[in-house]
Amino acid sequence: MAVFVLVHGGGHGGWCYKLVAKRLSALGHEVHAPSLSGLADRAHVLSAAIDLDTHIDDVAGLLEFEDLTDAILVGHSYGGMVITGAADRRPERVGHRVYLDAAYPRDGESLHDHAHEQISAAKQGLHEVNGVELVMAPMPGFAAFFGVTDPALGAWTDARLTAQPWKCFEQKIAFRNEAAMRAIPESHLICTSTIPGRDMALLEARSQGRVWDIDTGHDLMLTEPEWVAERLDAVARQA
């Protein structure tokens, strides 16, 4: 049995892993799928202070207070920034990093730096609510932006999306234990459409070939939950 910590991306919450978590639990794994501060079921704690460091601390704190060791951190999209930071903060508690069509940052890089075109587009919708700068305001049909095209699944997703604090996308990650973090094994599950924007040779080398791709929407944990769960289970068994 492995311990998974599933970290969502921008505008999402722990809810987006419901289908994957159910399958992993049925295989005997322990699964944690927290919502990050200010989002989803934690939208009530939204404040102007929330940034990337807040979310890294969310996950690092979960590892600490749940006394998790050899945890497999899985980060989707912006969640790649978060799991990289959490593994850097608590490398002794992490056994594997999995990037789920996710950001793969270098030291001193923000998500805006890493995915400039996409995040610049999101910034066009920047607005302020109660002193908090937000992007990705949800609206009917927004799930299609994340590649969720099934009408029923799209409506379910739309009902759960929340706006994203802009600071999280703007803040640059600052490594403290990069050598220890990089020494933790990693794997990559990516959407075929994002391959042209990735350094595939680097990913293959750092992951020792543990790179899988699938032709589906960006929210692959929703559109292809069985495939994602099977690959995560394979990662756990290889570990």
Image (cartoon, rainbow, N blue to C red):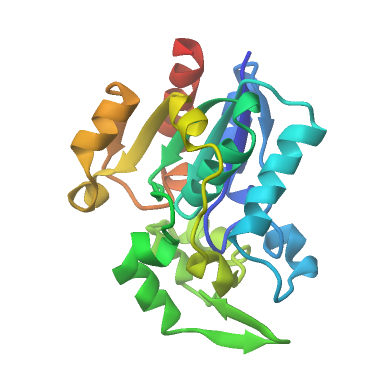
Seen in the image, is 49 located left or right of residue 222? right
Residue at x-position 45% and y-position 25%: 183
**So how many labels did they put on this image?**
0
Residue 149's spot in the image, x, y percent? 38, 59
Residue 219, image x, y percentages: 43, 51
From this view, report whether residue 42 is shown above or below residue 104. Answer: below
Identify the residue at image location x=41%, y=48%: 102
Q: Is residue 42 above or below residue 119?
A: above
Q: Is residue 193 left or right of residue 173?
A: left
Q: Is residue 1 above or below residue 218?
A: above
Q: Residue 44 appears in which quarter of the rendering?
A: bottom right
The residue drawn where x is 76% and y is 34% is 64
Is residue 49 or residue 14 the one in the foreground?
A: 49
- 198 lies above or below 140: above
| Whether residue 104 can be seen here | yes
66 left or right of 78?
A: right
* Image location of residue 150, percent across then percent down: 42, 56
Percent position of residue 20, x then y: 55, 35
Residue, x 54% and y 37% (percent of image)? 177
Instruction: Classify the position of the N terminus by image quarter.
Output: top right
Left or right, 193 with reference to 119: left
Q: Confirm whether residue 165 shows in the render.
A: no
